[in-house]
Image (cartoon, helix red, strand yellow):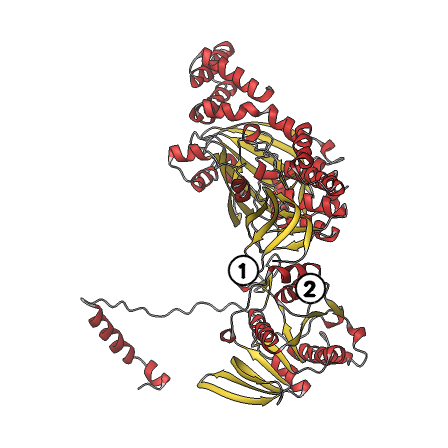
Amino acid sequence: MLHIVACIKQVPDSREIRIDPKTNTLIRQGVPAIVNFYDLHGLEEALRIKDEYGARVTVVTMGPPSADKALKLCVSMGADEGVLISDRAFAGADTLATSYVVALAVEKAAQEWGPVDIVFCGKQTLDGDTGQVGPGVACRLDYDQLTYVEKVEHLDEAKKEIIVHRHLEDGVERVKAKLPVLITALAELNKPRRAGLPGVLKAGRYQPVVWTTNDFPDIDRSKIGLKGSPTIVGKTWVPEPKKVETQMLTAESTAVLAEQLIDSLYATELPAKLGWA
Amino acid sequence: MAEERFDAIVVGAGPAGSAAAYTMASGGLKVALIERGEFPGAKNVFGGVLYRKQLEELIPEWWKEAPIERQIIEQRMWILGKESAVTFSHRNEKYKEPPNCFTGLRVKFDQWLAGKAEKAGAVPIYETVVTELIHQNGKVVGVRTDRENGDLYGDIVILADGVNSLLGKSLGVHKEWAPDEVSLAVKEIIALPKEKIQDRFNLDDNEGCTIEFIGDTFGMAGLGFIYTNQDTISLGVGVMVNDLKKKKIKPYEVLDSIKQHPSIRRLIQGGEVKEYSGHLIPEGGFTSMPPLSGDGWMICGDAAQMVNAVHREGTNLAIASGKIAGEIAIKAHQAGDYSIRALGEYDRSVKSSFIHNDLKKYRGIHGLFKEMNSDTLFGSLPQALNDAAYEWLLVDGVFKKEKQRKAVRTLKSAAGGNMELLRLGLKGWRAING
């Protein structure tokens, strides 16, 4: 049976984030935690593969003990197991250290529940916004990485091949790859399901598997947590809104107004910059 | 349909529902706790006072672990005039041990109480709406939810779905509210530095103060409140819906105007409004309480109109009723009888409890408001009292005897004459001591 790992992260609900005007940092206190929504698209695709071909879906997250709520949500949707990688020693990890630990967890999941065929990640998180952890995990596992995937066209279970569509800046790339692969999901990939009642009942009693540093005997402690994180945040600030000149157009009809708008746009440097001129 | 069967299904994870779920799960019943909000408390609103007593019977020393804001040692009552106030207050160190009541925020408190029920074994089913009750042979046997395969079966269904209980309505025990049975409360949570709150309200550390006020609500029947939290103030006002309708005033207009009152303005000065909420409060009390049980079901808390408007008690009535319902459910489960015969014990238990007795004591209040002109009771009388106090305390060379006469005259004319004032006094007395 296929074994799919979906990596998720619990993040502060970005719709409710505010910035402390004094310290310029995010006010996290009292902000509800949600599952990073790109990750949910990854999980949903894993569950669709499970529905169609039959697969075992393991969800992995790294975070504080309270992240078990995120795993329960995944289990309610249909994941078979949820793993919480949680240890004080992992705290303060940047994308480099995080991808190291997540890659170890995928390897451990393979030992526990069978070889892994596909790893799903979201294309990026709502709080960090780097998009680096997915590719980092792929590199460490030596999997082919399929980033920015908007569609899984075909999966050949026997040949262990997958065809996906990658949404790039200048078009769509249709790629065939040999499993195992790591896929990072775009929101266009699918619409995550709402759990049915039996799933919610299962999740209500479910206790996630917890892995600490002790569960990884070969872990290199210099590569985890704050120590393993070379990223230094030099400064954060809230960008001032740019002040731009405003020109109001008025005309007797919409058609004339549109003409005027195009004329005034072409009078600027914008078309040249965009390569339209 | 979920294949699993439950001994009891609780609809609504507010104080009533969570208390019932906690009681039953602790008693070994298999319990499902359903909540429509993203988490318990997400959709719930109250003024902000939690009492020690009723919850203590369920969870000893609960305040030591629950997320409370401040322990109340002073309660003030204000009767407001346009730019004045006559105030009464009581402050007592004795309220510290044992504590009497606390301020709290529902978002935190409800999550905590539901968490207790979960830890006791109740299965949480959140972000789930119960759309209808499932009946078989005239009995309630389960609930239908808005999730896929969403039917859930259980021996007993406890309805704790709040003031606008749609399920109660579907059972026919819960009619649409008349506008004079329900008030609309609006509330703001205003952030202020802790030290400012402590200075402005004369408090130390975790000490808290509550203020309730009447008057200056455009002559509508209403009660306002100011409660101190750790680093926020809860400020709100509830007004009878029929009065809002009659005067064509929106609830937030009342709140905005109250915030300008000189006695209140200074208390909240410089604060930032963090949260704004509105909620219906059942005010019908005793006379509006529906039958509380039937074949396979019981109803608790706001859904059963259990609010004591005079003493601003709702949450503790909810908790007490949830606890009683839970205990009756355990008995019914042991006897294997879920009919109205067994569950009717709930009605009888509530009747012998403080819930029934307190609500009965004030049953006249509702009638008093209904009969009396709100303009008099909540407009001209409070103003007259303030005018009388002004005259009484003003030193302007007028003989004291004349002053006293003047003060009494002001009150009399506001009530509409001697007989009216007497009648009002008698009615008020009866309403409160009936």
Which residue is at 47% across, 27% downward? B378
* Circle number at residue A16: 1
* Circle number at residue A68: 2
Q: Is residue B408 above or below residue B62?
A: above
Q: Nearer the viewer, mark 1 or mark 2?
A: 2
Amino acid type indicated by mark 2? Asp
Q: Where residue B176 sits: x, y (%)?
A: 48, 37
Which residue is at 77% across, 48% downward? B28
Residue at disc 1, secondary structure: helix
B357 or B154: nearer the eye? B154
Q: Is residue B151 above or below residue B83?
A: below
Amino acid type indicated by mark 1? Glu
1 and 2 marks on the same chain = yes
Q: Where residue A98 sits: x, y (%)?
A: 67, 76
A237 or B385: nearer the eye? B385
**A192 left or right, relative to B410:** right
B384 or A8: nearer the eye? A8
Query: In which quadrant will I find the C terminus of chain B?
Result: top right
Q: Where residue B383 sits: x, y (%)?
A: 46, 25
